[in-house]
Structure formats: structure tokens, C-alpha cells
Amino acid sequence: MKQIKKLPKFKNEDEERDFFARHDLTDYFDMSQAIINPVLQNLKPSTRTVSIRLPESLIAALKTLANKRDVPYQSLVKIILSEKVKQELGLNQ
């Protein structure tokens, strides 16, 4: 059985990145214990900032709805957009 080496402490991500660029990952982890296709429930999808012009009255209405649901209004906008896109694509069945 292969001896697993102990990982050094890294000062920062750059040092860690350099280390693994020069070393074999399998020397430091027991790959027989690896989880194949793990479920990453808490992984958040990548996001991108967009700008959109909305009428003041629509923003006020969104803020009122968000307040009733006790969520930030920008989160509510994402929820509504997501639901509508799924509906339009026929994914809400």
C-alpha cells in the first residue's frame, strides 16, 4: 500500500497552487477513498451582474412583494425570473 504524504501548510492560495503544479496529487490523498460524483448541495451556481432599467413603480411593487415574503427584493426578482423562464420552457411539469 502506498504511503500517503502529509500536506504542508500553505500561506496563501498562490503558494498552494504552485505546490500542486509541481507535485502529484495522488501522493497526498488516498484516491481509493475518493467519492465518485459527489452531490454538492451547497454549491452555488456562478452568477453574473447585469444592469436592467425598470420603472420606479415596478421596483416599488417588487419591494412590497419582497417585504411580504421577507426576502430581499433582488432575490425575489431572481425567483420570479427563474419561475417564468421554467414555465416558458415547459420545465414546470
Image (spheres, helix red, strand yellow):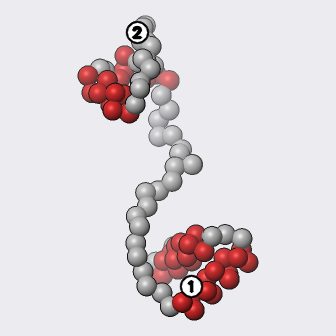
Question: At 50% from the left edge and 91% from the top edge, which residue is drawn?
Answer: 55
Q: Amino acid at mark 2?
A: Lys
Query: Disc 2 designates what residue?
Result: 2
Residue 43 in picture, x, y percent from top left: 52, 49
**Residue at 68% in and 83% down:** 64
Task: Provide the secondary structure element on which disc 2 rests.
Answer: loop
**Local crowd at mark 2 within 10 Å, few (<14), some, or many (≥20)?**
few
Given residues 32 and 27, the one toward you in this image is 27
Q: Residue furthest left?
A: 22
Q: Is residue 24 left or right of residue 77?
A: left
Which residue matches tag 1? 59
Q: Position of residue 71 (x, y in %)?
A: 67, 69
2 or 22: nearer the viewer: 22
- Which quadrant of the figure contains the C terminus? bottom right
Q: Nearer the viewer, residue 8 or 31?
A: 8
Q: Image check: 86 left or right of 68?
A: left
Dot 1 surroundings within 10 Å: few (below 14), some, or many (20 or more)? some
Would residue 64 be visible to someone looking at this image?
A: yes
Q: Residue at x 48, y 28 (%)?
A: 34
